[in-house]
Image: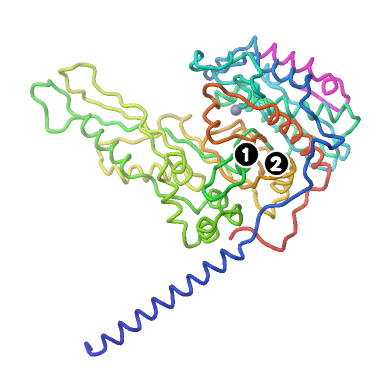
Amino acid sequence: MWANLPRVLALVVRGFALTLAVLTAVVVIRTVTFPSYQTSPPECKVTDPDFIPADEERLARFTSAIQFQTVSYERGVGTPQELAKFVQFIQKSFPTVHSSPMVRRDVVGNYSLLYRVEGSDASLQPYMLASHLDVVPITEEANWEAPPFSGQVKDGYIYGRGTIDTKHTLMGSLEALEFLLSSGHQPKRTLYLAFGHDEETHGHFGAKVISKVLQQRGEEIVFILDEGTMVVDDFFPGVSKPVALVSVSEKGSLVVKLKVQAEGGHGSMPTKESAIGILARAAKKLEDNPHPNMFGTGPEARMLEYVATEMTLPYRMLSSNLWLFSPLVGLLLSQTPQGNAYARTTTALTRFTAGNKDNVISPEAEVIVDHRIHPMQTAEEVLEFDRMVINDARVVLDVKDSSSVFPPSPISPHGKDSPTYAVLQKTIQQIFPDALVTPTFMVANTDTRHYWNLSSAIYRFSPCAMSVADLKRIHGVNERISIKAYEKVINFYYHLISNMDEPLDVQHHGHTDGL
Ligand SMILES: [Zn+2]
């Protein structure tokens, strides 16, 4: 038997070399032949006769919109008077929209707005453009370069709370509609505009009610576009062009409560283990054992594949061969908190409660864990994983309460076989001709959480170009948008509405999605 060893070894080495050669060949061939997912439709130009400029009047309407302090503080606690004034302002600012016989406007849930623009072809399914009227509160007011509700223009930028989240999409879509209706155009396809008034506090009194109204009308919406991810510079390593990120899903959330009850007593004669000690160990286990890396199983993999052909070589090779490199890319991604949020269900220990006296051993301890669920996982799987990791019967683990579970959203169709994604991609590339369009998911939630019953094609995308550095201004200090960027927002909606007059059809490239 031992006499055969050299032969066996030689066979193993040869087999290994052969496998390596085949793998290398496949990797090289795929890298070279990987299909492009990008298109180049006719560009929207400033010189086009129907280009909508952000002239003085439109700019004034936008800066005025920023001055309404439509802040949402917490569920059910907002600024009703400001909302009412803002709604009046909108009515006054867009006279054609508000007087056209084609438009029906309903005020829903006291302040939210729902517009129905009647299309000329009743056989076409309607679509919906969503935004919201409210904004988040101001933080660090002293550090703002312009007062946060001034709408002041400085160096080509409009400053103020809501400029990016999301009065630009709200006012931009209304400007486009006003322009269209003023020029005597009736859209072929019926269009809804839906503006909730409490998105920042989960939309229970706005979007949720809008959704009910539409459901009662029996509406099936062909697609919904709401605020969301944007056109971002320097987002991917190895990609020099800006990337338009279209979110086709949203992460879910799950708040878990861990509780331990143990013997209490006096601090002078402690038992071997305390409730605090047992719970602290369990909590640390959760932190040390993250949920499985899901990279490659959901839309986050498409995010790289759709830009693969535009990447520099090493990145291009990795992104066009995720069948092989998913684990490696997932590992690389998980090295930063931002990347990790795309790679897996995240675990954040957010609150620890125990004890109330220096010399008394607390008989119980509680910790709250905030999970954001990856689109390819379920809340049940997350709970089960936590139990397995903790593996201690003394730790009682439960969903905090009925409002603490929110599953990941269904994944909307994307890619070349999806006509709704295609019309969005076309419009984006008309307005942002340099940009690459790619699907992703959101780690935060939007009003679309209330719209799942209306449409299976829900996209979260704000037609606005931003640098990565500027992203932190959203919900932060010095939120701003450039005049040029706002102009693009208006023209994006104009082109989208125009494109929706054409039949919704898939692009035929003879290539099926789902590599
Ligand atoms: Zn928002």
Q: Residues within 10 Å of mark 2 (few under 14, many from 20)?
A: many
Q: Residues within 10 Å of mark 1 (few under 14, many from 20)?
A: many
The residue shown at (61%, 65%) is 33
In the foreground, 217 or 428? 428
Residue for badge 1: 231
Q: Position of residue 114 (x, y in %)?
A: 73, 25
Q: Position of residue 141 (x, y in %)?
A: 51, 14
Left or right of 140 in this view: 223: right
- Boundaries of the magenta span: 83-106
Residue for badge 2: 432
Left or right of 386 in this view: 481: right
Q: CA distance from mark 1 to mark 2?
A: 8 Å
Quadrant of the frame with the C terminus: bottom right
Look at the image and name its color scheme.
rainbow
| Secondary structure that dominates the magenta span | helix
Q: Amino acid at mark 2?
A: Phe
Q: Amino acid at mark 1?
A: Val
In the foreground, 371 or 444? 444
Left or right of 466 in this view: 187: right
Q: Is residue 367 above or below residue 73?
A: below
Question: SS for tag 2?
Answer: loop
